Amino acid sequence: MLFFFIIWFNLIIMKFINYLFIVIFLFYSHNAVSDEKPGRFFEDQPDVTDDYQIHFIYLLAKKTKDKERDINGWIEKEVKKIDDLFFKMTGNKQRLKFDYRKDGKLDISFARMDRKARKGGWNVNYPDYYLQKQGFNNPKKMYFSFTDASSGDGGQMGPHHGYLFIKRASGQITKISIHELLHGFGFAMPCTRGVKDGAHLGVGILSHELSAKFGKAVYDHKDPTCPDLKDSVYLTPTSDNPFDPLPIACALGQKKRGQPPGNYEIPARYTHKKLLKGRTNEWCTYKLTEYAKKDWFKKWKE
C-alpha cells in the first residue's frame, strides 16, 4: 500500500507542477501579447533623413498599466505643444528636429522594462541601460520617453536619454519637457552665465519657476567661447556652425569618470575655462551597456 501511495502522491505532485508551469507560461505570454497592438512599433522605424533628431518613446515599467499613449494620439498632441512653445521662446526663429516615419507621421516607439519602477533617479541608470540594449543607441538621436511609471520627479534627462513622468508632471508637461530637453542639449553648460545647482539657472525655463523663457545666457548669448542653444544640431533651421552636445558631455564624462569608451572632444572653438574644467558630477551614458556593472542597478527590482 505504501508503494502505491508513493506513486499516487508523485503523480499528484507532477500534475501540480505541470499546472503551475502552464499558469506561469500563460501569464507571461498574455503580458507579452497584450503589449502588441495595431499601429504600435517596438523598434525605431527606418529614418527619412540622416540628420540629428529627437526620437520619442512610450516607456512603461514591468507592471505599469498601458494607456496606449503611443497609438491614441496623446504623444503627438503633447509634442506639438512642446514644439510650438519652443518656437515661441526662440522668437519664432527655430523649432526642434523630430524623428518621422516614411508615411510622414511622428516615429514613436513602445518599450516595457523588465523591472519595476522606482522613485529614485532614472537617467544615468537602468532605463538608459535597458533602452540602449533594445537598440535605442543612435549617437545622432536624443531619446525622450513619456512614461506612466511612478517617480518623485516630473522629469529627468541626461546627455542621451530623458524621461517625462506624466502623472507627476501633470499641468506642466510642456514646460517640463522643454526643461528636460535642454538638459539633454547640455544646458545649462558649465560655462553658462549664472549656472547653479548642477545645470540650472535662477530664472527662466531652466529654473524651478519654469517660466517660458530661455534667458540671454542660454539663447543668443554672444559669447563664442561657450555653446549657445541656437547652434544646437537639434534645432531647425540649423546654425551655420552647429554643435553636437553628445561629444561635449562624453568628453567631460571621460575627464571626470573615465567613461564612456571612445574618443570625444570639445569643439576647439569653445575655450571657456569653466566648460573645459567641467563639473564634479559629469556623466555621459552613451554606450552604457559596454561598461555598466550589474550592481549599479540593484535597486531596480525584477
Image (cartoon, grey):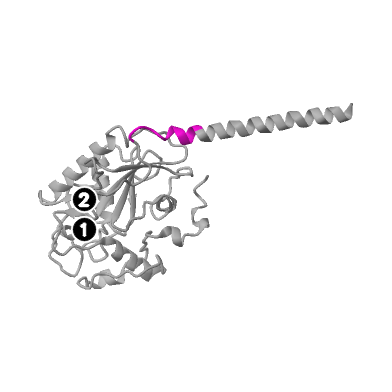
Amino acid type shown at disc 2: Lys
In the picture provided, is 41 more to the left or to the right than 126? Answer: left
For residue 292: magenta? no
Above or below, comparing residue 147 to residue 192 in the picture: above
Closer to the camera, 13 or 65?
A: 13
- Magenta stretch? 30-39
Q: Which residue is drawn at 27% across and 41% down?
A: 173
Q: Residue 97 carries which label?
A: 2
Q: Where is residue 240 in the image (x, y as percent from the top left)?
A: 13, 63
Q: Position of residue 143 (x, y in %)?
A: 32, 50
Q: In the image, is 178 to the left or to the right of 134? A: left
Q: Are marks 1 and 2 in contact (CB under 8 Å)?
A: yes
Please tell me in which quadrant of the rendered image residue 69 appears. top left
Residue under label 1: 233
Where residue 118 sits, quadrant-wise, is: top left
Asked if residue 220 is positioned above or below residue 54 in the image, the reply reads below
Residue 34 magenta-drawn?
Answer: yes
